[in-house]
Image (cartoon, helix red, strand yellow):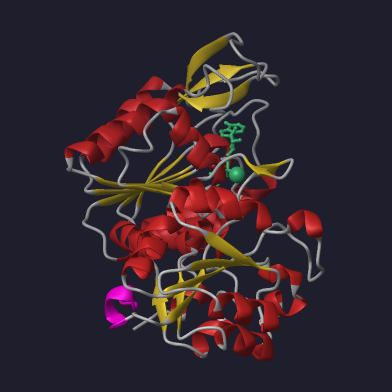
Amino acid sequence: MTFRTLDDAGSLAGKTALVRVDFNVPMEGGKVTDDTRLRVALPTIEKLRQAGAKVALLAHFDRPKGQVVPSMSLKPLVQPLSELLGAPVRFAEDCVGGPAHAAIADLDAGGVVLLENVRFHAAEEANDAEFATSLAELADLYVNDAFSAAHRAHASTEGVAHHLPAYAGESMRRELEALDAALGNPKTPVIGIVGGAKVSTKLDLLKNLVGKLDRLAIGGGMANTFLFAQGVDIGGSLAERDMADTAREIMNEAKVKGCELLLPVDFVVATEVKPGAQSRPVTAGDSLSADDKILDAGPATVARLVEAITASKTLIWNGPLGVFEVQPFDAATVAVAQHAAALAKAGTLIAVGGGGDTVSALNHAGVVDDMTFVSTAGGAFLEWMEGKALPGVEALRA
Ligand code: ADP
Ligand code: MG
């Protein structure tokens, strides 16, 4: 996968870079409660500043739906960003037109301005060509550092890239390189783990993965649907019983494509989902009662997964193996995550994970720093796992 990066941009001294960042940070009462996304943007901002460029930051916040909604202003981010950068950050009351041009004109080389919420303009999400041109008029080059917004073809993520030289920022580059190492051009054998609640939300993902992976382990509530389709008793477990045909199709497709499917061979079962609930181990095929729920993978399944991961060079993971939010049903997810992270730390496995609840689960297991890469991109990460082209990434191709 080749895409243009800031190393391809030549001399940046005196130029203005329009930088699309993801500043959709959690806020409470006008205060940023988690500045992770601000920190993620720092390497690109620093690199541009050091090269003597002016930096105009472009971002969306929340869903103002094309209206100016004062509570969704990006202004509260100016101070925390300025503190992280150790440099002043100006603010422009609009991301296009007079206020934006004036704020940029006022910057010295290496200066930074945060432009107001781009979604205050309905033309942003409509990917309006005139609006994209207005954005492009602000700068000499465009830098996209927001992988998490790259699955949307909006003016600030896609349209503007057609009007300026366009480059991947440092975080975008890091994410694309990690994803390429996990699924684009991975070291084989490659194993995938797909878990979570439902088959129906991950059909495209499963179909793409069985065509690409050497092994695919299915876990979580989703595995129940596959087991049910094979005639295994799943009692009163969460499952999409009407998706049994689809599950059989996927199993067939895996066989045709030479992807070995690993379904759970044992489970942890309980009658209620609450902390410390009485639970018992069950072997797949044993009969369950109507109020039994499969809430986690069992020890034999974990052992098999650990062995399969050890025999692999690359792991791509989305979806927990059990109801990890409630102990003890986090056990399988935690054990497998810690094994994968240890191999990644030792350098024998490339281990990449992502997805909303998956990030929480990997955090809960304490492994995020040791994994090769954990994507917090949510929707963009899932679409990439589904094999879809992301408009914001396509626009950066060399
Ligand atoms: P992600 O957000 O990472 O893509 P999902 O949203 O697909 O992941 O799935 C996460 C959810 O799946 C978690 O809330 C977890 O409790 C649930 N889950 C996992 N295993 C089971 C199970 N056996 N029964 C019910 N829910 C499960
Ligand atoms: Mg989720």
Indicate the position of residue 54 as horizontal and vertical percent values: 45, 74
For the C terminus, which image quadrant? bottom left
- On screen, residue 350 versus residue 255, left or right, reads left
Indicate the position of residue 36 as horizontal and vertical percent values: 49, 46
Q: Within the image, what quadrant is residue 287 found in?
A: top right
Residue visible at 30% across and 46% down in the picture: 372
Q: Where is 128 relative to 57, above or below?
A: below
Q: Where is 340 relative to 39, above or below?
A: above
Indicate the position of residue 237 as horizontal and vertical percent values: 64, 29
Q: Nearer the viewer, residue 18 or 348?
A: 18
- Chain part drawn in magenta: 1-11
Q: Nearer the viewer, residue 133 or 77?
A: 77
- On screen, residue 180 versus residue 317, left or right, reads left
Q: Where is 24 relative to 108, above or below?
A: above
Q: Nearer the viewer, residue 237 or 92?
A: 92
Asked if residue 245 can be seen in this view, the reply is no
Residue visible at 52% across and 90% down in the picture: 163
Q: Is residue 4 magenta?
A: yes
For the N terminus, which image quadrant? bottom left
Q: Is residue 99 magenta?
A: no
Q: Main secondary structure of the magenta part?
A: loop
Q: Within the image, what quadrant is residue 49 found in?
A: bottom left
- On screen, residue 178 versus residue 72, left or right, reads left
- On screen, residue 372 versus residue 236, left or right, reads left
Indicate the position of residue 39 as horizontal and vertical percent values: 45, 50
Residue visible at 49% across and 24% down in the picture: 330
Asked if residue 148 can be seen in this view, the reply is yes
**Quarter containing ligand 2?**
top right
Q: Nearer the viewer, residue 316 or 113?
A: 113
